[in-house]
Image (cartoon, rainbow, N blue to C red):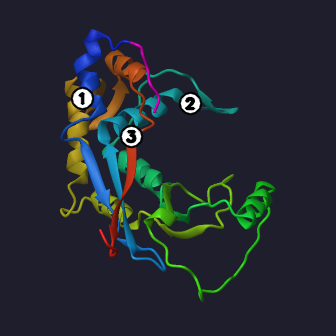
Amino acid sequence: MNLSFDPIPDEVWEDWKWFVCPEGCLLGMREQRYQVENSDVSLTPCYVVNLPKLVMSDVMWASRLENTPSGVVDTDNYLREVMVSVDSLIDGLVFLLSQHPMVVRRKAGGSEEERRLAEVLDREEFILVNKGNEGREKLDLADLDVQFFNPFAEGAKPCPDMLGMVPAEMCIKELSIAKAGLPDSVVREVIGHAIEELRRRGMIQVEEGTVIGMTPKGRAVLDVEPVHDLLTCRCEVRSAGPE
């Protein structure tokens, strides 16, 4: 956790408190339960999105980044005119979730074999070993390490200890339903509510439901509160073993 000792300006105090934990503007989604092979443990990936932070993040980067003949340039200008719609926010959220599948790994031990394997992987080489399923010990929760990241992203290290991966397929399907405007989803409504609340607090400018810019007050809030933590990833654990 990053601690800051900088004071929160009085003029943004109330907005900052709401921005950190915006009641009524959090979007929670859950995936299907994953049964860990050779174990009594089942895991359910859960995602919680801080929608005001999602909006402000998209507005910030839409304003700061500019396409030039020499490539994309960070202008560091938060107050340029932008066009951020509910649909573009849903697209950004789909991409974000696609980069955060739940990866279940076996916890690294201290055996000589594991140390040798770690040294090999540091040299970016691959070893594929098939030991079969016979004689494998049963895994419990203490044997497992759960993280949310894309193991196939460029530059990611190989994961020979990966037991399974659960992509956010159901969550992305729910977002796709929302983008299509089908009545079974309330996602559009919740995102629209977050946009309206940011507008009401004077942090963004909105025209016909589309964000067209950030205000100096919105910039002041971003000066004291980051938006990189807009997505929280957790997993629910169930075990058939003794309590």
**Residue located beneath label 3 in the image:** 230
Q: Which amino acid does label 2 sit on?
A: Glu
Q: The residue tagged with tag 1: helix, strand or loop?
A: helix
- On-image quarter of the C terminus: bottom left
**Residue 233 versus residue 195 in the image, above or below:** below
Of pointers 3 and 2, the one earlier in the residue sequence: 2
Residue 4 covered by magenta stretch:
yes
Residue at x 39% of width, y 25% of height: 225
Kindly report the distance in space between the C-alpha atoms of the residues bearing marks 1 and 2: 30 Å
Vertical placement of 39 versus 82: above or below?
below
Please tell me which residue is depicted at 70% across the width and 32% down the height of the picture: 70
**Quadrant assignment, res 218:** top left
Residue 202 appears in the picture as rendered: no
Find the magenta span and give its range: 1-6
User: Of 191 and 126, which appears nearest the observer?
Assistant: 126
- Kindly identify which residue carries mark 1: 18
Determine the residue positioned at 74% across, 67% down. Answer: 113
Q: Where is residue 166 in the image (x, y as percent from the top left)?
A: 46, 67
Any part of residue 13 in sight: yes
